[in-house]
Amino acid sequence: MASIFQGVGAATALSSSTSFDTKKLQLSSRRSFSVRRASFCVVRSGGGAKMDSCSNRIGDQLVTNAVATKADTPAAAASASKPGHELLLFEALREGLEEEMERDARVCVMGEDVGHYGGSYKVTRGLADKYGDLRVLDTPIAENSFTGMGIGAAMCGLRPIIEGMNMGFLLLAFNQISNNCGMLHYTSGVHSGIQMVACSTPYNAKGLMKAAIRSDNPVILFEHVLLYNLKERIPDEEYVLSLEEAEMVRPGEHVTILTYSRMRYHVMQAAKTLVNKGYDPEVIDIRSLKPFDLYTIGNSIKKTHRVLIVEECMRTGGIGASLTAAITENFHDYLDAPIVCLSSQDVPTPYAGTLEEWTVVQPPQIVAAVEQLCR
């Protein structure tokens, strides 16, 4: 049983012009659960407010830093010379989803408005017309119910992608995700629970989407709504990324900065200021939130001996807290300073933009934290 949870936008369909044999999608009831293979997708957004007003502006500011190098060279010019094709992040998700639906007839999508409407963020646009309503299934506003339906479909051999639209809605299905999806797989002799990954660029959004669909583990893929309009050139040939590997965004010597999702771009903005001040930060997009890529993280810590974690998650019970514990347990002897974790404040995110900025980590805070660490 493999599962993918999708909350911001991904869906599929069965084309009316394509023959569809439902027998091919059924497994014998006499087969043991442990040998059944399926996929169940849930993707969610980390920040759901103001997509139209903010995503274009933020995307324009940050796209040139999507691929960062140690030398501060123009990334846009380098990207334009690369082979491949340019896609926005939500288009890269759609391309990955469509390729997997074409490759494997067991892949299906279900969620609110994922069908002919094309999804709230248009990630599934056109898929219902191509693959039909059986594989791109519009559901009622009942997250707990259709998430459970997806888990059951995965147990029976399909590879469903459950789109939860956003994390606030997806939490309504937390019992299904935690108590059923993860535990059923683990207690059936597979010994692997839910995996969690967060995409941050069009390139890794497509690669992680394809990897999550193909995985035989339940996977939660997190998408950030304010990154949907990021543009990047991605390869024409097929590629699939590892669900358990971090990405070295910028090599450095003085401090290891661990981040993920949208905070990657806040960190890279801060890195420019830090370089001008004489610091050489190493930036790692951890991507895999469960399990952590402790090999990549550990090698960096052994080199820099200082760690800064930057996340948009709230401080209490967040990914940063788990990451801090893992680093302390495994690499304490290599640290020359206490681990610093910058997280969002433990308050509901305000609607007003000016107040929201006070609750979320900003580049100046990152610069100040590095300066404090490297004294």
Image (spheres, rainbow, N blue to C red):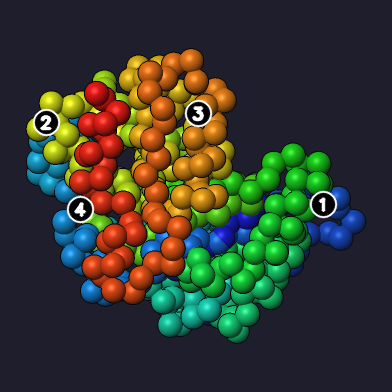
Q: In the displayed structure, would residue 94 be above or below residue 282?
A: below
Q: Nearer the viewer, residue 339 or 197?
A: 339
Point out the residue furthest to the right here: 30
N-terminal of the pair, mark 1 or mark 2, is 1
Horizontal placement of 1 versus 246: left or right?
A: right
Residue assigned mark 2: 277
Q: CA separation, marks 1 and 3?
A: 36 Å
Residue 154 picture location, percent across and down: 70, 60
Residue 102 percent location from the top left of the image: 50, 60
User: Pointer 4: what residue?
Assistant: 62
CA distance separating discs 4 and 3? 29 Å
Compared with residue 257, is residue 221 higher up or lower down, i.e. above or below? below
Residue 7 in view here: no
Are there few (<14), some (14-19), or many (20+) residues within 10 Å of tag 4? some
Where does the image place residue 144, in percent across and percent down from the top left? 66, 73
User: What residue is shown at x 68% (from left), y 57% (from top)?
Assistant: 178
State which tag comes first along the sequence, 1 or 4. 1
CB-based contact (under 8 Å), mark 2 and mark 3? no
Find the distance from the CA under tag 1 to the CA under tag 4. 46 Å
Mark 4, secondary structure of its residue? helix
Mark 2 → mark 3, Cα distance in angstroms: 27 Å
Q: Residue at x 25, y 45 (%)?
A: 365
How far apart, in angstroms, are the residues tagged by discs 1 and 2? 58 Å
Q: Which mark is residue 33?
A: 1
| Residue named by callout 3 | 327
Q: Nearer the viewer, mark 2 or mark 4?
A: 2
Please, what is the three-letter code of the amino acid marked with disc 3? Answer: Ile
Mark 3 lies on a secondary structure that is: helix
Query: Which of the two discs, 4 and 3, sits closer to the camera?
Result: 3
